Image: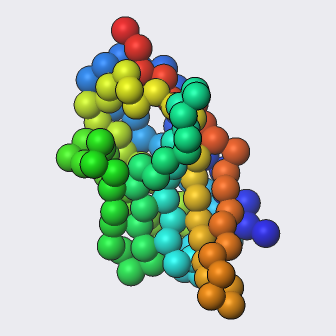
Amino acid sequence: QVQLVESGGGLVQPGESLRLSCAASESIFRFYAMGWYRQAPGKQRELVAEIASGGSTNYADSVKGRFTISRDNAKNTVYLEMNSLKPEDTAVYYCNAYAFVLAHRADAWGQGTQVTVSS
C-alpha cells in the first residue's frame, strides 16, 4: 500500500499563497492520476485538482486560474500551488492517488493537511 504524506498547510491571510506537497512512498508512474481533494467542516470532500500520468490536468471551477497542480516524477511528489487564497479555501486538503485494478478504481489517501485562510 502506497503511503502519501502531505505537507505545506498553514494559516495565511486572504490573497496570500501556499504550496502543498505530497510525497509518495513509491513511484508515481504506476498511478493513473494523482490529485488534491479538500473537505471543509460540514461539507463533502471535493476534488480540487488532479494530474494524470501523461500530464493532463483538471481543476474545480472554484480554483481555476488560482491553483496549479504539478508533479515531479523523479521525486515521486505532487504539488499544489495555491495563489490568491480566499477564506472559502479553508479546509483539510488531502492528497489522492488512484489506479485501476481489474477495471476497478483503487484509491490511496494521505492523512490531510489543514489550510486556513483568515484575516
Which colour scheme appears in the figure?
rainbow
Asked if residue 112 can be seen in this view, the reply is yes
Q: Is residue 96 left or right of residue 69?
A: right
Q: Is residue 2 above or below residue 13?
A: below
Q: Is residue 1 left or right of residue 104?
A: right
Residue nearest the observer in this picture, 107 or 43? 43
Quadrant containing the N terminus is: bottom right
Q: Residue furthest bottom?
A: 102
Q: Is residue 55 above or below residue 82?
A: below
Q: Position of residue 82 (x, y in %)?
A: 35, 40
Quadrant containing the C terminus is: top left
Asked if residue 25 can be seen in this view, the reply is no
Q: Residue furthest top?
A: 119
The structure residue drawn at horizontal position 67% and vertical position 56%, both measured from the top left corner, is 109
Q: Quadrant of residue 104?
A: bottom right
The structure residue drawn at horizontal position 33% and vertical position 56%, both measured from the top left corner, is 59
Q: Position of residue 5 (x, y in %)?
A: 66, 50
The structure residue drawn at horizontal position 70% and vertical position 45%, both measured from the top left corner, is 111
Q: Residue furthest right?
A: 1
Q: Position of residue 96 (x, y in %)?
A: 58, 59
